[in-house]
Image: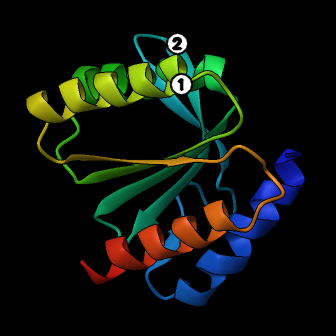
Amino acid sequence: MESAELKAIISSYLDGFQERVSPAQTGRAREFPLAVSGYSYFADFAYRVDGTTWLFVEDDEGQTAPHNASKYWRWIEHNNITQPIHLLHIIGPSYGSYKQLAKFLSEKINKEYSNFHYHQICTANWDALEWQEVFKRTITDILQG
């Protein structure tokens, strides 16, 4: 799926929560820099919920999924992030091994940082509506929880 299409889907749903959800950088949720020792990893989408909770969304094809899970580990550790973090990881068509590895890494992160919450949403087809419904439900659960 093209980034613009995905951004439109994400934005259209999150717009309903504007009183609680805002881009991590003023006016910009896309390509948020995760600074670590003079380097930057980039979050596909970054938001703050109620000014206290991080909400990240990554959209990947499978081969990049493990990297995108692990960059948060490095960022949390290096910056001593203590606020709650939710990573919604939308993974498109790929081999199951990449999805499994991303989930494994995220479970390890959660063992070290109990404030880290990983939500893996997989789809075999970006055009399918099922992943979008799971995404919306997950966001709603986070905001209500």
Give the residue drawn at x 71%, y 43%: 124
Residue 60 or residue 49, whichever sits in front: 60
Please state if 85 lies on the left or on the right of 112 as rendered: right
How many numbered marks are there? 2
Quadrant of the rendered image containing residue 40: top right
Where residue 65 sits in the image (x, y, percent)? Answer: 55, 25
Where residue 7 sits in the image (x, y, percent)? Answer: 77, 59
- Whether residue 76 is situated above or below residue 63 in the rendered picture: below
Please state if 94 lies on the left or on the right of 22 as rendered: right
> Where is mark 1, residue-wise?
96
- Whether residue 113 is situated above or below residue 38 in the rendered picture: below
For the residues bearing labels 2 and 1, Cβ distance under 8 angstroms? no
Amino acid marked by disc 2: Tyr
Secondary element at image label 1: helix
Which circle's residue, 2 or 1, is located before the other in the chain? 2
Give the residue drawn at x 46%, y 25%: 35
Give the residue drawn at x 20%, y 24%: 108
Quadrant of the rendered image containing residue 10: bottom right
Quadrant of the rendered image containing residue 32: top right
Q: Is residue 110 visible?
A: yes
Amino acid marked by disc 1: Gly
Secondary element at image label 2: strand
Give the residue drawn at x 40%, y 10%: 37
Please state if 121 lies on the left or on the right of 4 as rendered: left
Please state if 126 lies on the left or on the right of 45 as rendered: right
Q: CA distance from mark 2 to mark 1?
A: 30 Å
> Where is mark 2, residue-wise?
39
Figure coloring: rainbow
Residue 124 or residue 24, whichever sits in front: 124
Where residue 115 sits in the image (x, y, percent)? Answer: 17, 48
